[in-house]
Amino acid sequence: MWSGRFNEPTDAFVEAFTASVSFDQRMAMADIQGSLAHAKMLHRIKLLDDTEHTDIDNGLNQIRDEINNGSFEWSVSLEDVHMNIESRLTQLVGNAGKKLHTGRSRNDQVATDIRLYLRDAIKQILEQIRYFQAGLLDLAEREAETIMPGFTHLQVAQPITFGHHMLAWFEMLERDHSRLVDCLVRMNQLPLGAAALAGTSYPLDRHYTAELLGFDLPCRNSLDAVSDRDFAIEFCADAAICMTHLSRMSEELVLWSSAQFNFIQLPDRYCTGSSIMPQKKNPDVPELVRGKTGRVNGHLVSLLTLMKSQPLAYNKDNQEDKEPLFDTLDTLGGSLRAFGDMVPNLITNRDVMYQAAKQGYATATDLADYLVNKGLAFRDAHEVVGNAVAYAIEQGKDLSECTLVEMQGFDSRIEADVFDVLSLEGSVNARSIVGGTAPDQVYLQVEAGRKLIS
Ligand code: ARG
């Protein structure tokens, strides 16, 4: 492509070392889409005549077919997806093919392709998030009245409902979704027309190309357009946060499905056995997702480091943006797909969770609140209940199993109605505040959630 200026051919190793076609061919459809729009614009401003435009159109469509049916021959010596396609176009349609690159550089071309590619990919991720969220809402509704221990410091804290816990996961995903929507907005500007770095002397109609490709407007500065990859970094940051959320869910799923917790069972199709221990059912998928979070976080750091201190405008460094970006898409997409099917189909062991909540003195706060209602200051009530819990532990029973006389030994204001607040049902039902764990709140939040994602 550039033989004119050189006295010797590129070293074979250097050719392979600098080539990106093995991984950037993944953007081939975006590259063709961008070229079709560029050609249409060139025709409109009369830099291509009717025949040339038709030839380019037909040639690009044929190349699309060749790539889709696997007959396209990719060549490393043509370095990247852009030159592979352009070279094939010239082979197919001759002179017209050589005119396609008028007013364009690979620098604005690649910056456009990544945006086109990523834009579609993010839309798919958004759908996957919605699908998972819808499943979580169904699960929350199904388990709205299922009582489990809620934890802080992984110590039993207060009883909550399983549905409420699923709604917490729903909220994390809702923010992940909105972050990605924001990311799309900032990304949706067209680099084409920036050419190599300074813009072009041809009177390109950048607004027209932007409209054809569904961009909101052409990038306002040509140097910025070809050199920044902040949109890819932003996506990877959003992906890392989403994976971090999935890793937290993973950790809970692993814990809950262990024999020690035994709160849930994951669908068999998402687990594997052990080659040596016949009793094992391992939660491989959540463990893997937890592990894969590390590589997505790593990709974010790769891209940040790639961009750090780069002088304007385009540098070859930027070719290194694609593999981390693509792997982030694959990893996040795969993890969401697995969770979207696995989580809504988990089975809860309601009885086990109920007993676990009972054993942990989870209603101690309710007893303190009860005493506050009877006139004690909260700090004094806290102290009284602390003594009561210490006594119950010593006796090896739950607070609700103490007699009224025993309870009155801690504070004379305690009456028979204390047993209403010591029950797990009483405790969760009492938290019928906006955002609280009571089943009636869970039902309301499920309804609101369905509206939000519809
Ligand atoms: N393969 C290159 C990349 O991914 C395309 C742009 C090359 N531009 C250049 N001036 N060498 O960034």
Image (cartoon, rainbow, N blue to C red):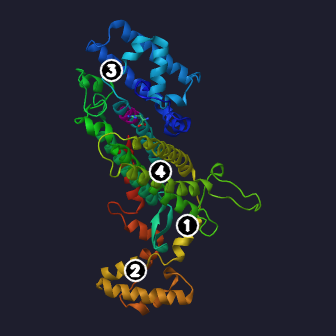
- Ligand 1 picture quarter: top left
Horizontal and vertical percent for residue 343?
54, 52
Is 286 drawn above or below residue 39 in the view shown? Answer: below
- Amino acid tagged 1: Met
Q: Secondary structure at mark 1?
A: helix
Per the rendered image, the range of residues in magenta is 110-116
Q: Is residue 158 left or right of residue 354?
A: left
Sequence-first disc among 3 and 1: 3
| Residue on which the image places disc 2 | 367
| Residue on which the image places disc 1 | 353
Contact flag, marks 1 and 2 (Cβ < 8 Å): no
Disc 1 versus disc 4: nearer the observer = 4
Sequence-first disc among 2 and 4: 4
Q: Quadrant of residue 319?
A: top left
Q: Which mark is residue 136?
A: 4
Horizontal and vertical percent for residue 156?
49, 74
Sequence-first disc among 4 and 3: 3
- Amino acid tagged 3: Thr
- Amino acid tagged 4: Leu
| Residue on which the image places disc 3 | 102
Disc 4 versus disc 3: nearer the observer = 3
Residue shown at the point (23%, 23%) measured from the top left = 201
**From mark 1 to mark 4, how far is it between C-alphas?**
19 Å
Q: Secondary structure at mark 2?
A: helix
